[in-house]
Amino acid sequence: MVVDRSWEIAFDMLASRPVRAARMVLAVRGPDRTAVIVLDADSDAFMTVPGLPRHFAPETVSLSSDGTRLVFTARQDDGAGPPRVVLHTLATGDRREFTSDDYMRAALSPDGTRLAVLADLSNGPGIPGVGDEIAGIELIETGTGARYPLWSAEGYWEEASISWSPDGLLLSATYLTLDDVLTTVVLDPTGKEIGSYAERVALPGPHSVWASDHELIVYPEPDDESPLITIDVSTGGERRFTRRNFDAYLAISGGRVVRPGPVPERLITTDLNDDDERPFLSISPAVPVCALDIVP
């Protein structure tokens, strides 16, 4: 697994070329450019992805489950107009785009046939108490482009997180209710709520949210410690881990947590109880990481 070893990236020396598939993606803000870096699944070398739209949102970048496509949102090429959800094929640079004023973040289903998209369905100016504030999820069939409303609730996408379970039978999303309570909901593909968990927040990376087909990994908010918690959505049972390191959670993969290390250019991993700390990734020079997604 990617998290079982340590890696090094020399940011200024990275080649830019297509790859067949990637095991990991990072979106970073370099000193002179924003870049998407992938770990080539065939060579275990890091590359930057060429040919991306100028105005893509780096915090929304993720990988398909087979590692062959990127998913992200972007403005139009002139920087204006409505946002678009982009599927970018790493090997060829081919893109599928789905445009709407409402789209904010998306996750591709494990079989690659459906996009679940966070949509802001509000009809007001975005000021609390003015107009109707509605957080919604829309499904897009990637083959045909057909779009279907799946779910909506009064609230905001304050913590924008959307993720498919590994078997593709469940969706999770985190939103802020009108009462300012961060809540994670679990839905089946028809939009039926399987569970709703107040004060539980999922990480934004689509592959950081599910420990198994029926177990979520979240953290409590507000909470002075905010340790990781697994929730069995079939029973509602929770298991609470221990938190000793209070740096941010960046990603979770293979039962290990990725977070900032002791110096700006390094990332580390620990187990879910914040034990067994290991070096994970060194980036030179140090650059801010906007998004990190690791495929199983």
Image (cartoon, rainbow, N blue to C red):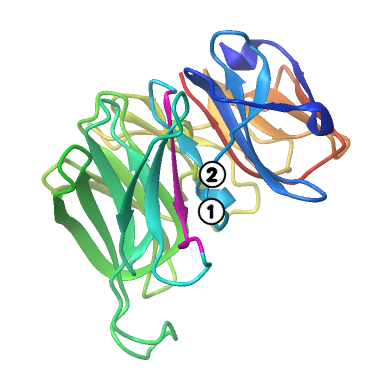
- Cβ–Cβ under 8 Å for marks 2 and 1: yes
Return the x and y of residue 34 as percentages of the image width and height.
Answer: 68, 48
Q: In front: 105, or 34?
A: 34
Left or right of 245? Residue 148 is left
Q: Which kind of residue does numbered mark 1 sit on?
A: Phe
CA gap, disc 2 to disc 1? 8 Å
x and y, in percent, of residue 138 in the image: 23, 55
Does residue 72 belong to the magenta stretch? yes
Q: Does residue 182 lie above or below 235 as drawn?
A: below
Do we see residue 185 in this rendering?
Answer: no
Observer able to see residue 127: yes
Residue 21 in the image: above or below residue 4: below
Please say if 25 is above or below 171: above
Residue at position x 77%, y 46% in the image: 30
| Secondary-structure class at tag 1 | loop
Q: Residue at x 23, y 40 (%)?
A: 142
Question: Is residue 295 found left or right of 153 in the rendered image?
Answer: right
Q: Is residue 8 left or right of residue 236?
A: right
Q: State which region is magenta.
A: 68-77
Residue positioned 24% across, 32% down in the render: 235
Q: Which residue is mark 2?
A: 52
Q: Position of residue 128 (x, y in %)?
A: 42, 84
Is residue 19 part of the magenta span, yes or no? no
